[in-house]
Image (cartoon, rainbow, N blue to C red):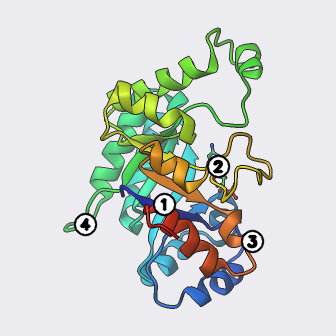
Amino acid sequence: MKNSLIIALDFSNKTDVVRFLEPFQDEKLFVKVGMELFFQEGPDILSFLKGKGHQIFLDLKLHDIPNTVYRAMKGLASIGCDLVNVHAAGGTDMMKAALEGLEEGTLAGQTRPYCIAVTQLTSTSEEQMQKEQLIKVPLEDSVLNYASLAKEAGLDGIVCSVFESRKIQEVLGADFLTVCPGIRQSTLSVQDQKRVATPKIALANDVSAIVVGRPITQAENPVDAYRLILNEWSGVKA
Ligand code: C5P
């Protein structure tokens, strides 16, 4: 899990996924399946990707009552995901239930999927959080609070920005996974991400794993883009 480069498969159907993966040939990748693809293709897309030997981050951000999350996670673990996530706002009981479901659903001889928490969505501004969620502290404090609750519940880490990673690991330990999107080859190319970092900056900030979507999926040559980012992320000089 540590040092992984996770490719966000932000496609709406299997045909596009197959077309994207084809030039990677037999290379084993770590891919992220989000709501768009999962809700179109269902669990079959996970079996398909597993069958090709890829590791899967299933990014469904579960947030419901503990029993429902427990049962959903039990099912997901049996399909064989490697990493799943929940909203920390669901509370410590829900996060503990997620872990129990994952443990119970993991097939004999397999390892339990890692489970990480989403704290505040990056689309939420401090002003919005204070006004709509009535959380009257700075956004950074709320992120750290949710991260601490995730750790208390036994989760493996959180989704966060590269720039939050160090502080979180200082407080919660270097083993607490920080999985970071918002990666660009140049900090000048931001698209709709607000604060972006290069793979090199992510490496320097000791983040555990990076999630990269469009810089690879929309590149003219996705395999070349993947290799460039992977080399930089692995600390290999280009
Ligand atoms: O295309 P891009 O590299 O911006 O994709 C980043 C991926 O990470 C997308 O799948 C997006 O949904 C996801 N993500 C994010 N910010 C978060 C959590 C997830 O960009 N805070």
**Position of residue 55 in the picture relative to residue 219 (left or right):** left
Local SS, label 4: loop
Q: Which mark is residue 110?
A: 4
- The residue nearer to you, when weighing 81 against 9, is 9
User: Who's the residue at 75% across and 79% down the image?
Assistant: 220
Query: Does label 1 or label 2 sit earlier along the sequence?
Result: 2
Residue 71 position within the rendered picture, expressed as x and y whole percent measured from the top left: 42, 49
Residue 56 position within the rendered picture, expressed as x and y whole percent measured from the top left: 47, 66
Q: Quadrant of residue 219?
A: bottom right
- Point out the residue furthest to the left here: 109
User: Who's the residue at 52% across and 59% down the image?
Assistant: 58
Residues marked 1 and 2 touching at CB (< 8 Å): no
Query: What amino acid is found at the position of numbered circle 2 in the picture?
Result: Gly
User: Who's the residue at 54% across and 47% down the image?
Assistant: 201
Instruction: Quickly name the residue at label 2.
Output: 182
Q: Is mark 2 within 8 Å of ligand 1?
A: yes
